[in-house]
Image (tube, helix red, strand yellow):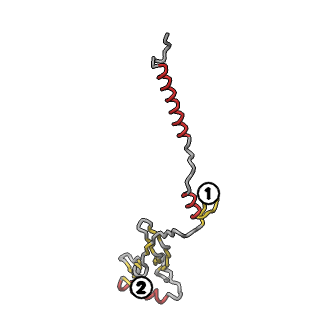
Amino acid sequence: MPGIGTLTMVAHSAETDFVNALIKPPAETIDFIAEVNAERGFNEFSAMSELLQKNLDEKGSFLLKGIGAFTKDHTGKIQFVPTPIDSIFTPVVAAERVVRQDASHPILVGDQQTTNMEMSNYFMEKQPLKDQWRIWAILLAAIGIGALLFYFYQHGFNGFGNVR
């Protein structure tokens, strides 16, 4: 608007609120950039700009229904306050995770592609015992303890010294 400033529509994308499981809607806001030099060019908004400037000079404010209000402070600075959009037109949507038990979908495991069903079956299978070293260690310890007990039973406990 010549001599006043520029109104710009700024689009904001939808936001996710994972903590509360919500998706906030996309929104558009109107930003006002006041014109620094009051250069009055002519375009299709010139008549509206002159009317707006006249109302601001006389009343100190001007309301554009459904858009916002222009105000002029005591220093002559023009400010714009946009009209908020009613939240009934842009409701927040609940976002819940959907888990389908019988659905099969491809997944990437390492560098190989497989399905979720194949991976479920893989983890459900009994894995062979890989920690058999513990069994062997316990078995060898039992044999060693048994051999020591047999030795002490046969020869007695004399402090491991030579007896003549």
Extreme residue toward the front, this view: 154
Q: Amino acid at mark 2?
A: Gly
Q: Secondary structure at mark 2?
A: loop
Q: Amino acid at mark 1?
A: Gly
- On screen, residue 143 above or below 50: above
For residue 108, what is the image quadrant? bottom right
Q: In the image, which disc is placed on residue 66?
A: 2
Residue in the picture at 64% in, 60% down: 112
Image-based side of 140 in relation to 67, left or right = right
Residue in the picture at 58% in, 68% down: 105
Image-based side of 131 in relation to 71, left or right = right
Image x and y of residue 141, in percent = 51, 33
Q: Is residue 32 visible?
A: no
Residue toward you, 40 or 103: 103
Extreme residue toward the top, this view: 164
Residue toward you, 143 or 103: 143
Query: Mark 2 Cα within 10 Å, few/some/many (few <14, many 20+)?
Result: few
For residue 22, what is the image quadrant? bottom left
Q: Is residue 138 visible?
A: yes
- On screen, residue 128 above or below 18: above
Q: How many marks?
A: 2
How far apart are the alpha carbons under marks 2 and 1?
54 Å
Image x and y of residue 121, in percent = 57, 60
Which residue is labeled 1 in the image? 110
Residue toward you, 2 or 159: 159
Residue in the picture at 48% in, 76% down: 26
